[in-house]
Image (cartoon, grey):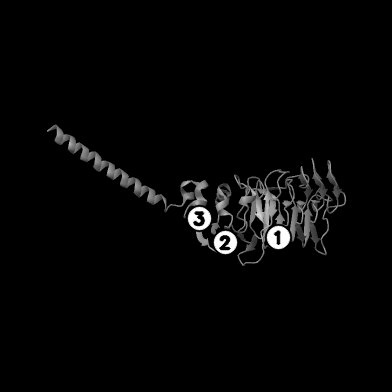
Amino acid sequence: MKDINNRNKHKRITRFHKRLISMILVFVMTLENIPLFDIGLKNSWPFSTYSKIKTFAAEGGTEYDIDSVGKLVAYSQNYDSSHVNDTLKITFGDGATSGAFTGYKSIGASEDKAFKGHIIIDSGMTLNLPESMFGYITDDVKIVGTNGEPALLTITRTAVTSDEPLFAKHVIHQDGSEGNEWKLHYDRFENPETNTYYVYDFAGFIGTIEEEAIVNISELIYDNLGTATSTPSKISSPGNAGLVCGTIAAKGSLTVGSISQTSDKGSDSYSVSSTSSGHAGGLVGGMEDGAKLTLGTDVENPQADNQGITASSGYAGGIVG
C-alpha cells in the first residue's frame, strides 16, 4: 500500500510540474507581444519586436519609429555597435517636445560605434538635450524631413555644459562620402513648469571634424532668446572653441552656406572663449595642416562688435583661432 501511495503522489507532483511549466511558457510567449514601454521596461525597448518597423536591408540596420521622448531616450541608452546603420524616424510632431529629455545619452560613444544611418524628422520638432546629440557620427549621415529633403534640426541645451558641443563631439569620414547637407539650429529651452525660456552655454555646434571628414552645413541658426536669463549663451570650451566647430583636423573640410544669429539682450550677442588649453575663433577654434574652411558669400562672424573672443593659452581670431 505504501508503494502505491508513493507512486500516486509522484504522479500528482509530475502533473503539477507540467502544468507549472506550461503556465510559464504561455506567460513568456505573451510578453513577446506586449509593448515593453507599456510595462515600464524602457531600457529594453530598442531590442523588442515592438520597436522594429522594418529591416533596412541596404544598410544592414533597422528603421525605428520614434514617436515619443521616452523612446528616443531609451534608444540612446541602449545604443551599441549593432545599431550604427539604423534609420531613426523621429516623429514627435510640431510643438510636442517641451521639457528636458532627462536620461538622454550621446549616441555613438566611440569611433567604432559611430552613427552611420539616416535621420528622418518632423517639421518644427525640437530636441531638448542635456548633452551632445552624438558622440561620434559619420559625414555621410542624411538628416531629412518626411519629404526626403534636407531638414532643419533644432536642438536646445537644458543646462550649462561648456565642454559639450550641441550636435556632435566628433564627425568622422566614411569612405566614399562627399558629405551630406546638414541644417542645424540652436534654440532656447522652454521650462514647461514656469513657461520661461533659457539659453545655456555650450561648446559650439561640433567639437572636432576629424581627419578627411567632409562637413557641409548649408544653414546654421543661433537663437539667443532667453527671457529667463540676463545674458546670452556663450561658446565655451576647455580646448579649441568656435561657434561652428572647435577643431578641423588634418585634411578635414568644413563648408558653411549661411549663418544667422539673434539675441534679445540689446547689443549683446555671444562671446567665444577657450578656457584652458586651446585656441578660440569666431567660427572655428583651430585648423590643422591641410584643413579647409569654405564660407558662403554672405557668411561672416555674427558676433556684435563689443563681444570678445579669448583664449587662456592659445590664439584668438575673428574667424579662426
Mark 3 and 2 residues: CB-CB less than 8 Å, in contact?
no
Dot placed on the residue nearer the N-terminal end, 3 or 2? 3
Percent x, y of residue 10: 21, 38
Please state the total of marks drawn on the protein image: 3
Q: Secondary structure at mark 1?
A: strand
Q: Could one spot residue 205 in this view of the protein? A: no
Q: Looking at the image, which residue is at 76% across and 58% down?
A: 254
* Residue bearing the label numbered 1: 183
Residue at the far left: name it: 1
Identify residue type, mark 3: Ser
- Left or right: where does residue 51 sit relative to residue 304? left
Dot placed on the residue nearer the N-terminal end, 1 or 3? 3
Residue 117: quadrant of the picture:
bottom right
Question: Of circles 2 and 1, which is in front?
Answer: 2
Q: Nearer the viewer, residue 120 or 159?
A: 120
Identify residue type, mark 2: Glu
- Left or right: where does residue 45 sit relative to residue 219? left
* Residue bearing the label numbered 3: 51
Q: Looking at the image, which residue is at 86% across and 50% down?
A: 317
Q: Looking at the image, which residue is at 34% across and 49% down?
A: 26
Mark 1 and 3 residues: CB-CB less than 8 Å, in contact?
no
Residue at the far right: name it: 305
Percent x, y of residue 54: 50, 61
Marks 1 and 3, how far apart at CA: 27 Å
* Residue bearing the label numbered 2: 59
Question: How crowded is the residue under tag 2: few (<14 C-alpha within 10 Å), some, or many (20+)?
Answer: some
Residue 139: quadrant of the picture:
bottom right
